[in-house]
Amino acid sequence: DVMEIEERDELVSKEDEQIEEHKRRRLSDVPIQEVLDAKHAFRWVDPVIRRDATVKEAIQTVIEGGMSGMMVVETTECGQHKRVVGLLTSRDLLRIMAAGIKEHESSHSENYGEVLDRVIGDYMTPISQVIYGRPEE
């Protein structure tokens, strides 16, 4: 099998390599919408969570959706999205959990679960500090 792979690699000419290189585009030349279309071609996950959601809900959402981050929104009383107020990433969730473990160890508390009940709105990055691009950009 290894021999077959090596033989196939030799079949690619320098001209073919140059053609492939020419087809590549600079990242700055690729519209965000094209990146989003490619990323979500197989399945769409709504990358949104409520500001009043708990850390536990956020962890479940990230894992179930296979996401690394999500927009935090304020919602109306009927549950519809109102506006984006921030961003929460899986790294933020790890920091929250680590801080909770540290607090638990220093206070000798018996309840690790308290950190899971914290509200993510207290830990998100406010939208005013988020650098983002629109799909048409």
Image: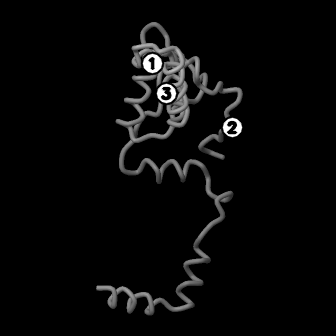
Q: How many marks?
A: 3
Calculate the distance from the C-alpha at mark 3 to the C-alpha at mark 2: 25 Å
Camera-nearest residue between 107 and 71: 107
Q: Amino acid at mark 1?
A: Thr
Q: Which residue is mark 2?
A: 131
SS under mark 2: loop
Q: Amino acid at mark 3?
A: Met
Residue 58 is situated, as x and y percent measured from the top left of the image, at 44, 26
Q: Which residue is mark 1?
A: 54
Label 3 vs 2, first from the N-terminus: 3
Q: Residue at x 65, y 27 (%)?
A: 127
Camera-nearest residue between 71 and 104: 104
**Label 1 crowding class (10 Å Cα cut-off): few <14, some 14-19, many 20+?**
some
Label 1 vs 3, first from the N-terminus: 1
Tell me the tag on residue 97. 3
Q: Is residue 126 above or below residue 64?
A: above
Q: Is residue 49 above or below residue 45?
A: above
Q: Is residue 65 above or below residue 15?
A: above
* CB atoms of marks 2 and 1 within 8 Å: no
Residue 114 is situated, as x and y percent measured from the top left of the image, at 44, 15
SS under mark 3: helix
